[in-house]
Structures are given as structure tokens and as C-alpha cells.
Image (tube, rainbow, N blue to C red):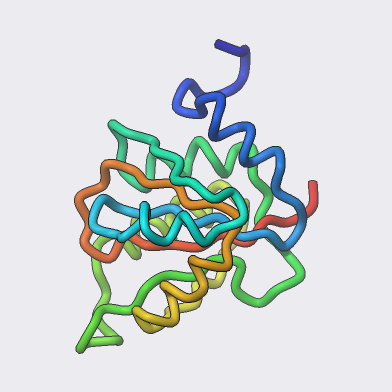
Amino acid sequence: MLIGIDPLIHAELIYALMLMGHGDELVICDINHPAQTIAKHTTYGKLIDVSGCGIPRALEAILALFPLDTFVEAPVKRMKVVDDPDKQMPIFDAVQSVVDFEHGSPVSIEPLERFAFYDAAKKSFAIIRTSDPGPYGCFILKKGVV
């Protein structure tokens, strides 16, 4: 245990966050996402589990250490609802609130079609899977500069 670091941030997670550089992307997802399959394609190459919490709680802990990229229009991406791309899911508002609060100002979140999201996730640095039941709890965060 370390002083000032949320206990949710375990050794492997902090290691992966520390390896990431400006512009690298981090996926945070619910239990429905094919995270294990997609994680094999990422830079990190394996899945990072953060069991026992949902996406908003995990984001609170991660964003206390992880700066969002301020050089892009939308440093956060999310998956669109299949067959109803304009539909808003409760997790979208919950994540928007946490991201805005932790960043200190409103953050643009870009919606991506399901398979476009999967393709983007494969190009990410790492994937973190939470115990969030979802659905549509799939987000990509672009790392900024400290």
C-alpha cells in the first residue's frame, strides 16, 4: 500500500499507466466487452482486471493519476448503442460526470460505432476490465501530458 494512491490501483495497473506516453490510449470496459480477446492485440498484450468495482469508481481512481489529452477535440470515446446510435445509456451520463469532475472542465466524448470501437480498442495501449454489468460500458481515454 502507498500513501495517496487509491487502493483500487494495484501494482499491474500502475505499472501499465506508468508505461504509457502522451497520445497512448487506455480502454476501460464492462464485463460484457470482449476484453480478453481484444487485449491480445494491444501494446500491453494482456488484460488488466479491476474486479469489484464499476466503471465510474475505476475512472475516479485512474483519472486522479492519468491526465487526459488536451490537444485533441475528444480525449474520450465510447461505443454507440447498436441499432439506436442516438440512444443514451445511464453509464454515458455517469462517465461524463466523473470525467468532467476529474478533468476540472467539460470533456468531449466521441461516440463510435461498435466495430469501429473494437478496431480502436485493438490499437490501444491496454484494456482494463471492471466488474460493471453494463451494457455499453466501453470507453477509450487518450493520455495527455503531466
Residue 87 placed where, x, y %? 24, 81
Vertically, is 18 above or below 101?
above
User: Does residue 88 appear to the left or right of 56 in the view shown?
Assistant: left
Q: Quadrant of the N terminus?
A: top right
Residue 57 placed where, x, y %? 38, 39
Residue 65 placed where, x, y %? 64, 38
Count of numbered labels shown in the rendering:
0
| Residue that appears at 70% across and 38% down | 18
| Residue that appears at 72% across and 62% down | 23
Q: Residue furthest right?
A: 146
- Name the quadrant containing residue 114: bottom left
Q: Which of 31 and 42 is in front in this view?
A: 42
| Residue that appears at 20% across and 50% down | 133
Residue 13 placed where, x, y %? 54, 34
Q: Which of 92 and 136 is in front in this view?
A: 136
User: Does residue 56 appear to the left or right of 60 in the view shown?
Assistant: left
Vertically, is 40 above or below 60?
below
